[in-house]
Image: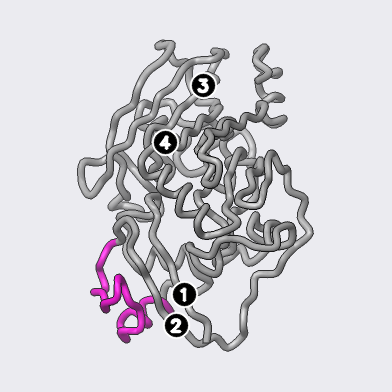
Amino acid sequence: MPKMDLIVDEEYVGMRLDAYLAENTPLSRSALQKLIEEGKVFLNGTVPSKKVKTEIDDHITFEYEEKTPTQIKPQDIPLDIVYEDEDLIVINKPKDMVVHPAVGNPDGTIVNALLYHCKELSDINGYYRPGIVHRIDKDTSGLLVCAKNNFSHQFLSEQLKDKTCYRKYYAIVSGVLQNGEGEIDAPIGRSEKNRQMMCVTPKNSKEAITLFKVIERYDDSTLLDIELKTGRTHQIRVHMRFINHPVLNDPRYGKKIIDQTGQYLHAYFLSFIHPKTNERMEFKTEVPEYMKRYIKEKGGSFNG
């Protein structure tokens, strides 16, 4: 009988328990609701209520019967490896690739590729997310660090929580920003109208701070250098929409869709302290080809 053992990380705080589990396990939401109602799901060692919402570091465990066993299959999918050692691996995730298996995406994910490439991965985040310390949206490209053991995973997770892990992004947003730089300090929580979306709200929200600098302006869009001071779900996408300059081509929060390839957002910079050497490590990637093409079409000169 398969067993789920999950620790809630920061990006999932504030979700209903059944919604969180539906996003992070292979089970449907209706099946999970039934398990919760039957008292088979344990939250921090106790049986939770149906409407409980997740908190940081919540420990969730349960067992379930499955008629057809599902296994995460290692797949020989090429990885753009930026750095690797015995404790961790840093990869440059391509656009349009899901990080870990879930309902609707059983394979073809970063996890499937990692299982083929690596002999061992951490298991803190459960069976379906081995090695995954943090995520990048499917339609976002860029740097991702994954852990090969639980010590490294915990060490890296602590840096995400205490904000000593630094992440920067290139984003092309709709409209022309007049200010050369700015700070967006606006709390983010789940939308009451659509629980699959986040929004700026004072209710059941967490602090969210985004810094931005203009790199280039075009006739109807702007290329930005963005730094995250916090790590909320969809933070950049939500904050840019909040100031009426949504990320170009964003299918969920955007206004202008120029094609179906997903938002123009790339995680180009990642810095953290190595769990074993205690040395600060920094990694950087160039502007991806899909953004270079757009910049060239707009007469821009930035090449990352």
- Closer to the chain start, of discs 2 and 3, is 2
Would residue 57 be found to the left or right of residue 260 on screen? left
In this picture the colour scheme is: one colour
The residue located at (44%, 39%) in the rendering is 253
Q: Which residue is mark 4?
A: 164
Mark 2 vs 3: CB contact within 8 A: no
State the SS at label 1: strand
User: Percent position (x, y) of residue 95?
Assistant: 65, 42
Using the image as rendered, state which of residue 157 and residue 170 is in the foreground: 157
- Over which residues does the magenta segment extend? 31-53
State the SS at label 2: strand
Q: Which residue is mark 3?
A: 224
Q: Which mark is residue 63?
A: 2
State the SS at label 4: loop
The residue located at (32%, 36%) in the rendering is 208
Mark 3 vs 1: CB contact within 8 A: no
Residue 66 inside the magenta-drawn segment = no
Q: Which residue is mark 1?
A: 4
Indicate which label's residue lies in the foreground, 3 or 1.
1
User: Percent position (x, y) of residue 77?
Assistant: 76, 55
Q: CA distance from mark 2 to mark 1?
A: 6 Å
Q: CA distance from mark 2 to mark 3?
A: 46 Å
Mark 4 vs 1: CB contact within 8 A: no
Can residue 94 be seen here? The reply is no
Which quadrant of the view contains residue 75? Answer: bottom right
Would residue 111 be found to the left or right of residue 253 on screen? right
- Closer to the chain start, of discs 2 and 1, is 1
Q: Which mark is residue 141?
A: none
Q: Is residue 32 above or below residue 227?
A: below
